[in-house]
Amino acid sequence: MKYSKLFGKTIKNVPKDATLASHKLLHQAGFIRESTAGRYYLLPLGQIVQQKIIKIVKEEMDRSGAQEIVAPILHPLYLWQETNRDKATGFGLITIKDRHGMEFVMGGTAEEMIVDLVRKFQISYKDLPFHLYQFSAKFRDELRSRGGLLRVREFIMKDGYSFHKDEEDFKKEYANMTKTYTKIFKRLGLETFIVEADNGDIGGDYAHEFQVKASAGEDTIYYVPSKKLFFNKEIAPTSAPKFNQLEEYVLPLEEVEGKGLIGVDELSKFLNIPVEKTTKTILFETDKKEVIAAAVRGEYNVDEAKLKRIIGCQSLKLLDPAKIKKLTGAEVGYAGLLNLPHNIKVFLDDSMKGRINFECGANKTNYHTINVNFGRDLPEPDKFYDFKETKPGDFYPGTNEKYETFRGIEVGNIFQLGYHYTKKMKGATFIDQDGSEKPYYMGCYGIGIGRTLSAIVEIHHDDFGITWPESISPFAVHLISIKNNKKAEEVYKKLDESGIEVLYDDREDVSAGGKFADFDLIGIPVRLVVSEKTDDKIEWKDRKNKNSELLSFDQVTARLKKI
Amino acid sequence: MKYSKLFGKTIKNVPKDATLASHKLLHQAGFIRESTAGRYYLLPLGQIVQQKIIKIVKEEMDRSGAQEIVAPILHPLYLWQETNRDKATGFGLITIKDRHGMEFVMGGTAEEMIVDLVRKFQISYKDLPFHLYQFSAKFRDELRSRGGLLRVREFIMKDGYSFHKDEEDFKKEYANMTKTYTKIFKRLGLETFIVEADNGDIGGDYAHEFQVKASAGEDTIYYVPSKKLFFNKEIAPTSAPKFNQLEEYVLPLEEVEGKGLIGVDELSKFLNIPVEKTTKTILFETDKKEVIAAAVRGEYNVDEAKLKRIIGCQSLKLLDPAKIKKLTGAEVGYAGLLNLPHNIKVFLDDSMKGRINFECGANKTNYHTINVNFGRDLPEPDKFYDFKETKPGDFYPGTNEKYETFRGIEVGNIFQLGYHYTKKMKGATFIDQDGSEKPYYMGCYGIGIGRTLSAIVEIHHDDFGITWPESISPFAVHLISIKNNKKAEEVYKKLDESGIEVLYDDREDVSAGGKFADFDLIGIPVRLVVSEKTDDKIEWKDRKNKNSELLSFDQVTARLKKI
């Protein structure tokens, strides 16, 4: 490819909102352009890289035994209604109506679509297991997009769905995918950490994310060094650091007026008690319209993902102020465990365990109660849970060691689904050996292609530009001519004929310095220079190395073929 | 690939609405499944074929100098408004609103998107020409879908857009694409006819379709044998067969009452005159809200595509009955050239030329006028046009020879766009050599991948199933084991290791006959059988040939490598 002909040349400017290296560099080097917020064009260079990523993912998926298919992007809404996912909040579902009034969902993930496909077939236990995957455009009506390809509203996802006769068989595929994903990301130049994560709106009981350690990441990963265990913050089991309880005796319950005092920090100052003695009580409504109260030690927040699992519900939302007032009699902000209506189920976080003389709301506007004690003012709890939002400094309960943390970019994820979809969707069954119909046991597996691309750039760049891993570099070499176009042209042709992917900077109106800077920015691993100085040799320089060498044409091709 | 593991095995049933061979066979052989009307899943076999088609299209597009990119599927509506295409009727546009209230169009074609991308760059004459193409899902809210992948509501299209400094440069690319498309379809096993066609809702002045001759086709192609000229029916220039005018003298104008008589056939019977003496007058409203009248000889219909070009408007619609009544004073069905308000512009088709004493509506409910004559009852026309719908039996005006016709499937199309988009879209300009800003001269080029797939099956099948061309067959060979799985397994492994694409029917519970029938249905070009009878040889049979041969493994691989 001649650079003079390439659409999408390098530019100096960066997008106003660009803060991440991958966003800036992919824009400047001519790989992407934004259409509308969170929707990108891939320019020729970007599309070559995207296709190389897809090719590697496909090779490894095929090798793992999965089969590629493709489903329509518009899913009939009735399928999402069958599993109640039309009401799931996390997807930002976009729905449309066609001219006949039929409603569709723009696919975010395709569990229902694939189950619907599978149930069109008569499948016997002999046909199991199978794993169907696709590469297709996915849509999320995200509130905010950010960082180039890192969180977008439209992207290519590899999504796969596996069907099994039972859990045991599924577990083999889960392990198979763990291995396959690790290999895929390794081939793409990414070291990934396998992190326990929440299933979110996908459903099922457990899931793992493939996280790349990067400061640009949106996720916080909690790490147990001695066990090499990784947890996404949202589900990391945690025990709070012990609170140094000074008092030895319970004190009399006391009510303190504190008008308009809301928030544990303000309260601890006003009451002159450590924040650890305060209590946060949050009222939620479940998807079954049940109201529950969840209480944590003041310095913690409630982790809804953990709480949902404990309650066993699909969604939770904060009870709205009007309902709080109606139920508790108090304004929002004064909710607490004291004087709570008996029909509200209470969940206590284990950070509250062992405290005496603590503060707790009494559902009385402008009043705060101190020296509250279990057994006297509140019933002695039979159970504590862990639903606090994990914080740096927290301990892993399994070993009681302090967590380490890092930021991660989630490039892939694997989900156990079990019977989550197949028990909701009628006819999602196979004929077992004994002739009976049984629901499939399922798993699903995703890789965000665009996010992977930007994660690669986050990892592989320096101050001057991108430093592509060879496996997905848009070209194998970047040939530069300096005032010697005729010889460079020959080298270009010969390299091209040898089947080597060459980007040839043939521009006549750009200085050597300008061409070198563009090479650094674009990030192809090898630079070749042909100039009057190089005589009948070619100057070879690695992108990541300062030194250069003069080589013959044959030496160049021999070395390239080894890569 | 082991057939026992393949998802999507053959079945006997065909979809209820399937009338076309490609629809039936692709369903039965396990290549496709319908999701909702006009939206299909590609099963593993179908996806392999689709990917092979895409690969060939990509190879030839790259070779032609075009560059692959990808644009978002959701186009901001304001871009379509810039060119007025949001009001174009032919696309069945689907629009959506995101959570922020921003409106989008689900891409049908991407002219505006690509122009919008290009105008984000500062392009000089030195960067021109360039041609950007993509493979992406396209959406059409079709009133009716039909025939499997032939006319669908969601499909993969290869769409390309070229940018030039002037018409002359564009014409080179138009010729380049004509050659490239012919080559692409040839590699896919399709002979294509290059047919002059209407630009429709795409815009521009001229366009050509690549049509495959097939009885399943939706288009009628008019063919001029001596000139090897092909026209899509909708724009075929035509002269009507001469009407044998018996009278020599003009007769007195006469008004005949004929209550409720509507339609030329009823009328010609009632008046006892040949249908050629009747006149069809149709009132239209243009996109500029102008009302026009178009009149053709009774046995013809008005061809709106031709008429639009003559008038020079983007869309036409039939004037609604209420407006007809208001304007002409008569009910719909009695419109004619007599007594027509003077502000309605009249267009006459050349089939009306030379007639005397003809019938023509007088805009009087329940009355018909006969013996109408130009010069006496109607002004002597200064111009006749050709906007009649071409019919079998019509003549090509250029040579006055009778057209031949055939049915065609449109698999690709190329359009001259000229300045149609770049003069409407602000800033769609490049810097010319003299420093001035000039709009791009454009062309665009499409290939429907799914429709091409089904056209291939329409052409390549027999009574027993599909007969894939080698270039896109899902596998190179179909290996069948008959009660000799161990040896067949060995052959499978060895073929696989030699890099040959094998579908291996390893099922133990299916008879030889059943396996042979499946081979015929699936349509892979070569069948290999390993059984007790074949000893240490392998039986080779071509799909299209009844004879079989016994070959050694080495002979098999040698022959396969030659293909």
Image (spheres, coloured by chain):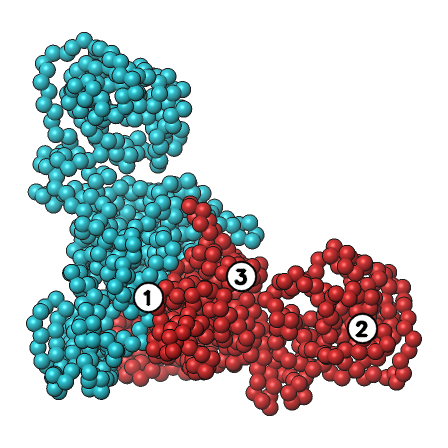
Chain colours: A cyan, B red
Of labels 2 and 1, the one closer to you: 1
Q: Count residues near mark 1 (Cα–Cα under 10 Å), then give few for <14, some for 14-19, many for 20+.
A: many
> Where does the image place residue B172, in percent across and percent down from the top left?
43, 83
Q: Provide the residue designation for mark 1.
A: A43
**Amino acid type at mark 1:** Leu
Q: Which of the 4 quarters of the picture holds residue A51?
A: bottom left
Q: Are marks 3 and 1 on the same chain?
A: no
As measured in the structure, the alpha-carbon distance from the residue carrying label 2 to the one carrying label 3 is: 38 Å
Q: Count residues near mark 2 (Cα–Cα under 10 Å), then give few for <14, some for 14-19, many for 20+.
A: many
Residue ID at (26%, 13%): A257
Element under label 1? Answer: loop
As measured in the structure, the alpha-carbon distance from the residue carrying label 3 to the one carrying label 1 is: 27 Å
Which quadrant: the C terminus of chain A?
bottom left
**Amino acid type at mark 3:** Asn
Residue ID at (38%, 25%): A321
> Where does the image place residue B471, in percent across and percent down from the top left?
38, 77
Q: Which of the 4 quarters of the picture holds residue B127?
A: bottom left
Q: Provide the residue designation for mark 3.
A: B84
* Marks 3 and 1 close (CB-CB < 8 Å): no
> Where does the image place residue A437, in percent across and percent down from the top left?
40, 46
Element under label 3? Answer: loop
Q: Provide the residue designation for mark 2.
A: B278
* Marks 2 and 1 close (CB-CB < 8 Å): no
**Amino acid type at mark 2:** Thr
Which residue is nearer to you in this view: B393 or A220?
Answer: A220
Of labels 2 and 3, the one closer to you: 3
> Which of the two labelled residues, at mark 2 and mark 3, occupies the earlier sequence position?
3
* Marks 2 and 3 close (CB-CB < 8 Å): no
Q: Are marks 2 and 3 on the same chain?
A: yes
